Amino acid sequence: MNYVLPFLYFSSFTSSVSMFNLVGLLIICLTGGADASIGVNYGTLANNLPPPHQVAEFLLHSTVINRVRLFDADPQILQAFANTGIAVTVTVPNDQIPHLTNLTSAQKWISDQIQPHFPSTNIIRILVGNEVISTANHLLIRTLVPAMQSLHTALVSVSLHRRIQISTPHSLGILSGSTPPSSAKFRRGYNTQVFKPLLSFLRATSSPFVVNPYPFFGYSTETLDFALARPNPGLIDRHTKLLYTNMLDAQLDSVYSAMDKLGFSDVEIVIGEIGWPSEGDKDQIGVDVSTAAEFNKNVVARVDSGTGTPLMPNRSFETYIFALFNENLKSGPTSERNFGILRSDLTPFYDIGILRPKVRSSNPENNPGSLWCVAKSGAETVALQRNIDYVCGLGLDCRPIIEGGLCYLPNTVKAHSEYAMNLFYQTMGKYKFDCDFENTGEITTMDPSYGNCEYQV
Ligand SMILES: *[C@@H]1O[C@H](CO)[C@@H](O)[C@H](O)[C@H]1NC(C)=O
Ligand SMILES: *[C@@H]1O[C@H](CO)[C@@H](O)[C@H](O)[C@H]1NC(C)=O
């Protein structure tokens, strides 16, 4: 995000349409959330964060988040997400962009940063730089698309271009004249020199245009309700006659209008960052835990709903909440350090509908006195694999641990063996010796079920 260039939105909209009463249109449908496809930005400018493997485990088992975006390509974090199935987006830092226009350097970057982790880590996208246009650095801006092209060519040369996309995220500072949304254009100068080649590249490679819309950087006292999608008078676009009831719709349609004017309305839009801080400087209105919860909850619900926007009806947008954690080493105003949805001990600041129903082990009354069979800690992988082969070879139902099954992820021998060993133990009538497995199994009172993966009782 870029707090230096706030995107001022509709500063004068309230007076024009105040006669409309839109209360009825603002009911946001909060569905179950269990099948949402929601991402999160995992920023690490902090000195109090939990180790990456704990973060990956927590996201997989305790939340419905199934996409993560990193601000670099940290090997330790990429390793932590191995075999989780979570879709990972990495970022090339801005300062490396000029050098990556050289194909040899781009190939080296792919072979050093990506190939050691792919495919065990499900890397789906590389973002080249972050909000490069807002840096106003001409060297970076000029080399952005060439660097994207050479990284793509490097992926082609190792046959990964159909698996991994290349894009670059933008702040809404790329737009000019965006009131009303249909009048938005890309900023003069960048329109044909940057965005035309960029969008051509994205279309040719079936990659999305990534934007970071932040109603938080666009609101004033008068437009707080519009920014939060609370009941408000709304805005009618005088050209299209379409009605806008919240700022995010207006921002997305502004982006769409600018793309459409260049002939690229078909290119997918991804919401790379969106969020609201839970703490700001003293006297900052609209910044507290309950407002952050309200905003982010609406974003999550919206991802589920697939309603789209006035200009893009029924479209859904892959969306990444900013951010996973507060980042205490960031500079700038207090709010910059307080966008996190989780505390550093992995407890949520507030619930926005991303948590899975509590893992049953913490709720023993659900299955009083029940026992399960799991792997002993320290059991050898080879032995555990033998257990899988043995149990599944007997013809017991191992479909849940086959690709696409509810217990396939995490795709590790240990997890799969526990599913199989427990299945055997339960099916055979719960005799202690049926959980021995040559001294690699043990009985537990803690239900190993998680998410939609149910261990038999
Ligand atoms: C690209 O980088 C390589 C290795 O540093 C160098 O040998 C080569 O001359 C560069 N190519 C161009 C076109 O600058
Ligand atoms: C959007 O979905 C609704 C409900 O399924 C449908 O009636 C409508 O025609 C769709 N609109 C577009 C533009 O696809």
Image (cartoon, rainbow, N blue to C red):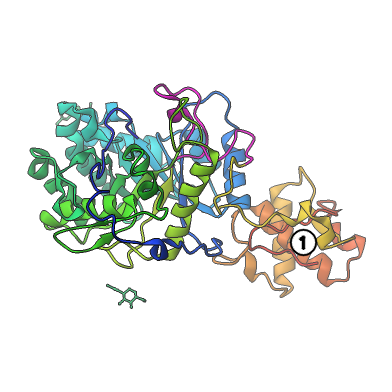
Q: Quadrant of ligand 1?
A: top left
Q: Quadrant of the N terminus?
A: top left
Q: Would you identify the image quadrant in which residue 214 lies?
A: top left
Is residue 141 located in the magenta-colored stretch of the structure? no
Find the magenta span and give its range. 322-347
Using residue 297 as the reference point, say whether residue 427 is left or right of it: right
Q: Is residue 71 visible from the viewing direction of this image?
A: yes
| Horizontal side, residue 111 vs residue 80: left or right | left
Name the quarter where the C terminus is drawn: bottom right
In front of the other: 212 or 6:
6
Mark 1 lies on a secondary structure that is helix
Q: Nearer the viewer, residue 39 or 25?
A: 25
Q: Quadrant of residue 12?
A: top left
Residue shown at 43% from the left, 65% from the top: 305
Does the magenta run of residues contain 332?
Answer: yes
Q: Nearer the viewer, residue 39 or 245?
A: 245
For the point 29% across and 67% down, the residue is 313
Estimate the x, y position of residue 265 in percent, counting from the top left: 19, 59
In the displayed structure, would residue 302 be above or below residue 68? below
- Residue that label 1 marks: 421
